[in-house]
Amino acid sequence: MAGIRGIGLAITAFAVYIIGGIGTFAGVALIMFMKGRDLWGWGEGRAIGYLFLCAGLCLSILGVLLMRIFRNRGLS
């Protein structure tokens, strides 16, 4: 039972880490290429890029921390 739960938690932590990485690189791309242009009515592309960059970094850090916690607790 602990093995099944551990695999699920590991997949969740890894997914958070991957989503954070995609968000980080998408934010960098928006900052570089969308300067001064509107992004689907959400606002300037550069500002949305900074949001994606910061949120992506936070999610990547959270994913790494979750992986470390699950490994150290013997849940994976």
Image: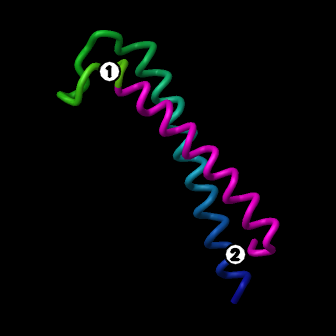
The colour scheme applied to this rendered structure is rainbow
Where the C terminus falls, by quadrant? bottom right
Badge 1: residue crowd in 10 Å (few <14, some 14–19, many ≥20): many
Picture quadrant where residue 38 is located: top left
Query: Tag 2, which secondary structure?
Result: helix
Q: Amino acid at mark 1?
A: Gly
| Residue at image location 35% in from the left, 22% down from the top | 47
Q: How many marks?
A: 2
| Residue at image location 73% in from the left, 81% down from the top | 3
Give me the C-alpha separation between circle 2 and circle 1.
39 Å
* 64 relative to 71 in the view: left or right: left
Where the N terminus falls, by quadrant? bottom right
Magenta stretch: helix, strand or loop mostly: helix
Q: Amino acid at mark 2?
A: Gly
| Residue at image location 53% in from the left, 29% down from the top | 25
Q: Position of residue 50 (x, y in %)?
A: 43, 25
Above or below, comparing residue 72 to residue 48 in the picture: below
Residue 45, labelled with which disc?
A: 1
Q: Position of residue 2 (x, y in %)?
A: 72, 85
Please report the bounds of the magenta region as a residue range: 48-76
Viewer-nearest residue: 22 or 50? 50
| Residue at image location 41% in from the left, 31% down from the top | 51
Badge 2: residue crowd in 10 Å (few <14, some 14–19, many ≥20): some
Confirm whether the magenta stretch covers residue 30. no
User: Are the residues flagged by discs 2 and 1 in contact, CB closer than 8 Å?
Assistant: no
Q: Position of residue 37 (x, y in %)?
A: 26, 13
* 18 relative to 69 in the view: left or right: left
Which residue was labeled with disc 2? 6
- The numbered mark, 2 or 1, whose residue comes first in the sequence reads 2
Confirm whether the magenta stretch covers residue 62. yes
| Residue lying at the far top of the rendered structure | 36
Residue 27, labelled with which disc?
A: none
